[in-house]
Image: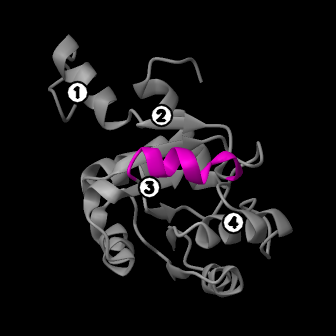
Amino acid sequence: MRGNGGRKRGKGQEQAMRGWLRPDWVVDSFFDLKPEGLRRAGIRGLIVDLDNTLVPWNSAEETAEALDGVRRLIDAGFRIVIASNNRSPRVGRIAERLGVRAVSFAKKPLPLGLRQAFRWLELPKEAVAVVGDQLLTDVLGGKLLGVRTILVRPLVETDGWATRVNRLIERRLLGRKP
């Protein structure tokens, strides 16, 4: 057995691990984000996940809700970049229609793709938040990047196979039953 050699994790280790997975804020949906609240928190730029955060993961196109939500924040002066682990040309197509830049195959939670999105925002770290529906990719990636994080509920209850595995691991790490 690798890792801790089969030993039980200490309470401090568990709390530290959970801290990396603890979002700064939790909201029902990306579309519930209010410009005033973000501004009060000092947020001026968002790195936003695509699948199940802005659009359903199984949707080929952007939705009117996504267009309205992104436009509302941009019109309020916020900078937005999409960072998706999806490799599909769909990521760029949807981003273009939303009027924002996108990093596809971002490899979250590794910070490489998130760093590119962060550079495009041209803002200090304290003014940026990562928004997404997964703890192991979006929240952990944001924490590793050194920015604040906002967890949203997935837009649809179904997931692709990789996300189903992630959600199972998330529940286990957080001590919830699968």
Which residue range is magenta in the image? 31-42
Q: Main secondary structure of the magenta part?
A: helix
Residue linked to disc 1: 16
Dot placed on the residue nearer the N-terminal end, 3 or 4: 4
**Mark 1 or mark 2: which is in front?**
1
SS assignment at label 2: helix
Separation (CA) of disc 2 from disc 4: 32 Å
Q: Position of residue 13 (x, y in %)?
A: 19, 22
- The answer to the question of whether label 3 and label 4 lie on touching residues, with beta carbons closer than 8 A, is no
Q: Amino acid at mark 4?
A: Arg
In this view, the mark in front (2 or 4) = 4
Residue topped by disc 3: 130
Q: Amino acid at mark 1?
A: Ala
Crowding at label 2, few (<14), some or many (≥20) Cα neighbours within 10 Å?
some
Q: Are marks 3 and 2 in contact (CB under 8 Å)?
A: no
Q: Residue 135, relative to residue 87: is it above or below?
A: above
Q: Amino acid at mark 3?
A: Val
